[in-house]
Image (cartoon, rainbow, N blue to C red):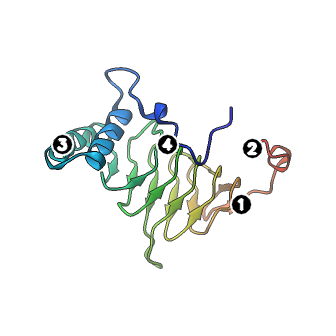
Amino acid sequence: MNISATEPDWSREVPGRLWDPSRRLLRCIRAYQLGGPLRRKWAALRHRFWSVITGAEIDPRTDIRGGLMLPHPNGIVIHPDVTIGPNCMIFQQVTLGTNRQTSGVPTLGGHIDIGPGARVLGPVTIGDHAVIGANAVVLRDVPAGAVAVGVPARILPAGPAQKEGRA
């Protein structure tokens, strides 16, 4: 199944059941971004509740393009100035933020998968359809379709599926 890097799949953010903390958190963020003053206050209260439940720190003003999935949102920290493209997936304990040596924050393209415990720090750009491995520390740009792993992260050579455009 091909997932678009440009068109958000909003169905990925729809709560599937009553207890669906990550999607409820995203729903509060969307309500905050789209609402008027009264709706924003109500969304902010709900956002605080779901932030405590999930253990995620995601500012409601963060630029999230749609279709974001947080399968296990515990410990996710996202700087308010980060840009997240459509249809990304972020696992637990991920940090997207600043780096002490350089100013700026990450910009994620579309359909990026970030593994558990990964850190993406500083003014880096992650290209569409890239994969960041578990516990990787990304301090440099990652090209589209690439796989980055390790500390500090390095780009893996393209495998047969990537060379044929199937990855």
Dots 2, 3 in contact, CB < 8 A: no
Pointer 1 with pointer 4, Cβ within 8 A:
no
Cα gap from disc 2 to disc 3, whole angstroms? 41 Å
The residue nearer to you, when weighing 37 against 93, is 37
Which mark lies nearer to you, 3 or 4?
3
- In front: mark 3 or mark 1? 3
The Cα atoms of the two marked residues, 3 and 4, are separated by: 29 Å
Answer above or below: position of 162 versus 82.
Answer: above
Q: Residue at x 60, y 69 (%)?
A: 140
Which quarter shows the N terminus? top right
Specify the quadrant of the image occupied by residue 155.
bottom right
Name which of mark 2 and mark 4 comes first in the sequence. 4
**Amino acid at pointer 2:** Ala
Secondary element under disc 4, as helix, strand or loop, is loop
Q: Residue at x 65, y 52 (%)?
A: 130
Local crowd at mark 2 within 10 Å, few (<14), some, or many (≥20)?
A: some
Query: Which residue is under mark 2?
Result: 167
> Residue 39 bears which disc, if any?
3
Mark 1 / mark 4, whichever is N-terminal = 4
N-term mark: 1 or 2: 1
Q: Residues within 10 Å of mark 3 (few under 14, many from 20)?
A: few
Q: Report x, y in % for residue 98.
A: 43, 68
Residue highlighted by disc 4? 91
Instruction: Note whether 78 is above or below 139 in the view shown.
Output: above
| Residue linked to disc 1 | 155
Left or right of 42 in this view: 163? right
Residue type, label 3: Arg
Say above or below: 61 vs 139.
above
Q: Nearer the viewer, residue 127 or 103?
A: 127
* Front disc: 2 or 4: 2
Point out the residue furthest to the front here.
Answer: 36
